[in-house]
Image (spheres, grey):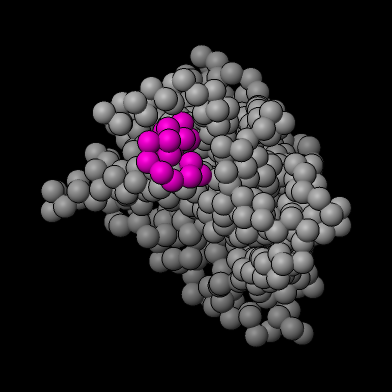
Amino acid sequence: MITSPITSEHAQHKNGHDHSCCAHHSSHHDLIISDLTVRYRDIDALKDISFDTSCGNRLALIGPNGAGKSTLLKAIAGLVRKKSGTIEWRGTSIKHWSSEFAYLPQREEVDWNFPITVRGLVEMGRYPQVGIWKKFSNKDAEAVDRAIESLDLVELQDRQIKQLSGGQQQRAFIARAVAQEAHVLLLDEPFNGLDRTATKTLRNLLIKLASEGRLIIASHHDINTAKSLFNQVLLLNTETVSFGKSDDLLNEEMLERTFLTTNNKKD
Amino acid sequence: MSFFTNIAAIEMSNLVLAPLIAATVIGFANGFFSGFVNLRRNALSVSALSHTMLPGIAVAVLITQELTQANAFIGALFACILVGLGSVLVSRNSRIPEGTALAVLYTSAFAGGVALLPHLPIVASLHDWLFGDIALISRTDLNLIFIISTLSLILSNLFMRPLLLTMFEPNVAAAQGVPVRAMQYLIFTLLILMLVASLQAVGCVLSVSLLVAPSAIMLLFTDSTQKIFWGGAIVGALSGAGGVLFSQLIDIQSGQAIVILLGILFLLSFILSPRYGILKGLIKA
């Protein structure tokens, strides 16, 4: 059984992007996960996951298939029920979904044929603010406009979502999160299927979003690119293997520990 | 000459007015609701549920020994709920997917209904319930159609945002506090109500067309959700009215005329639509 050396405090204060964190917010925005356990039927999908991070960071969740990366994202987003443990955001324990969190589904989970335009998708980000019956106000329309502009989607806003490239599709979903005014972006394999150029664009975008004070958490399966895309890493395999700066953790030894624990898990 | 005298005859006849209004209203409401059917991609389950109404009505007739609006409605509703929920129950508790469960259950139910037919006291008029005859529409039928259509339109517009979110991303909708289950039940209940409302007009078999074709036609022209719903309503209303009028000119029943009209419109849109028609693709290539 692997114990989990949680080195988050060190990681946070050492990392380069930390100083820009929440520049325009008075309080520090910490996300603290403690002893999070999620069960599907009788199987632990996540067991005693603990780490803490804060906005301004780009955190990658890395681990083998079935390690619980998606489940962790969904648990933080409030999409799956946790069995035990706490998720604390800005000093309060999160029980339900909050509009400060935006979950961006894996490509395969999106119904791309759904007749919705980029603008329609981004407008959905305002639903939590607008509620069921209220009309879209100017403020909502402006928020949608801003999100579309900041993600460089102005010319694509009337396209149906299937008629976009992979990178543009990611940007459309991120625009929705921006319109929602989410502080924490939870992305499920955002770099999947993107070519070199699109990867670079998305990387710069995530850096920009984080530097504006958002926290980016993304599952990521490509360990070769992880170091250049993310500044923090959570290595997990149902349990926490390690947490810290990506420069410190993404080495052969740690990866081997992460990916080879599968067989030892039963003891 | 006969064509024009026929049109004149239509204008004169009060007998046509009631069916005309009924077909237009049913077409409008069904056409609007077909937006949900197409967004959820469950045209096949609509077909399943429409067939399921037959045994429901048959059993209701068997129990009450008469065929009235009320018992047909309750019977159809009961059978649809039973088969619909039954398929959900089977799929949740076994490895059988919902579509498979639905297919097994509805074909069995339909067979049971057909087997019951010769044993019912009102054999002859059941044919109309299957294929409809809007010419025979009564005042009560008309009222029922009005009430159901209005109710369905109001409810679906009132809950449009959570309904759309539920259909696009049920996970995210649930997390945002949308009562996803309640929304799914709402769509299911409205669907059955719409099916029952169109019973008299086109019958339970052909009603599938009204609940699928109108917004499927719109899907070939637009990506705007608004246009798919309201455009579907307009297409449905025009086809309803057009079908009734055509059936007066040529000697076929109006139910069939409405469905054939929708089929022709769909085919034309599929070929000619400037947005998603195949001709556009062919010309490009």
- In which quadrant is the C terminus of chain A drawn? bottom right
Q: Quadrant of residue A201?
A: top left
Residue A219 screen position, x and y as percent? 54, 58
The image shows residue A170, relative to residue A195, as above or below, that is: above
Front position in the image: B265 or A237: B265
How many callouts does the rendering have?
0
Q: Is residue B181 above or below residue A106?
A: above
- Pick the quarter of the image with the N terminus of chain A: bottom right
In this picture, residue A189 sits left or right of residue A149: right
Front one among A104 and B242: B242
Nearer-the-camera pick, B58 or B118: B118
Front in this rendered view, residue A12 or A37: A37
Task: Please provide the residue range marked out in magenta.
Answer: B239-255
- When the figure is inspected, residue A208 is found, relative to residue B207, above or below; the finding is above
Q: Is residue A108 magenta?
A: no
| Direction from residue A63 to residue A82 in the image, left or right | right
Give the side of residue B236 with respect to residue A24, left or right: left
Residue B278, how many percent across, how many down?
24, 51
Identify the main secondary structure in magenta.
helix
Residue in the picture at 74% in, 83% down: A266
Residue drawn at the location 72% of the way across and 31% of the way down: B140
Residue closest to the far right? B63
Question: Measuring 30% from the left and 31% from the top, which residue is drawn there?
Answer: B2
Residue B168 visible to an observer of this rendering: no
Quadrant of the rendered structure where residue B180 is?
Answer: top right
Q: Quadrant of residue A91?
A: top right
Query: What is the x, y in percent for residue B108?
Result: 68, 71
Q: Which residue lies at the image location 56% right of the left edge and 72% below the top edge?
A: A65
Outermost residue, top direction? Answer: A138
